[in-house]
Amino acid sequence: MIADFRMAGRKVPVLLGGLLFLSQATASDLGNAAGAAAGIFADIYVHEAGHAFAAHAIGASDIHIHVPGSQCTLLCGETSWVIPSTVSPAKQRALDVAGFAASNLAAEVLLHTDASARSAFGQGFIATNLYSNVAHVVTYYTRVVGRNGYRGNDIDAFEQAGGSPHVLAAGMLTYSAWTLHRMKQRQIPVMFVQLRL
């Protein structure tokens, strides 16, 4: 026997009532999930597009964006290019940080208005951007280039071009903490979770 409960004053079998409840909750949840997923992948593509545009600006050829990249299974990207041998170390460093610059700038644009920042797309984009900043720093300090096939990330490349990886890492972590602080002050959730730090 199926138990009954009342919905809008009518007896409804529990199984049917459960399905009705799920269908109403799921429509909103699916919309949020789709928006967040779009924001997640948009951030990855904006980061890689930053590298691609910088590579094009310094005269690189054969530029390709790959999502996912070759060092992950899904949530990362990789941009490949062929740069002229005459590119200076300063231009190489600019190329290495262009992904961070593009995605952090785009996150700032979304944070500029509450509606954008609170949207599912905005939350997915901003959260992925902040995660990417921290993950790049953690990976830089915990993985060794050449060990177990690891080729390095943007911070490793920045260091190889003569940049200070510690200054770059400190800047990325500081920006991420500052952004989380601003989001908490404005009560903007991160992936639908309200910050209460």
Image (tube, grey):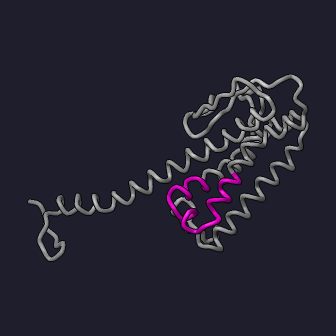
Segment colored magenta: 104-127
Residue at 56% x, 33% y: name it: 73
Above or below residue 168? Residue 19 is below
29 relative position to 93: left or right: left
| Residue at the left extreme, as displayed | 1
Image quarter (top left, top right, bottom left or bottom right) of the C terminus: bottom right
Does residue 149 appear in the picture of this structure?
Answer: yes
Instruction: Examine the structure image and report whether residue 108 is included in the region drawn in magenta.
Output: yes
- Front one among 148 and 123: 123
Image quarter (top left, top right, bottom left or bottom right) of the N terminus: bottom left
Above or below residue 50? Residue 192 is below
- Front one among 193 and 65: 65
Q: Toward which corner of the image does residue 173 lie, by quadrant?
A: bottom right
Residue 170, position as x, y percentages in the image: 82, 53
73 relative position to 129: left or right: left
How many callouts does the rendering have? 0
> Which secondary structure is most common in the magenta stretch?
helix
Residue 78, position as x, y percentages in the image: 66, 33
Residue 159, position as x, y percentages in the image: 86, 37
Residue at 74% x, 36% y: name it: 153
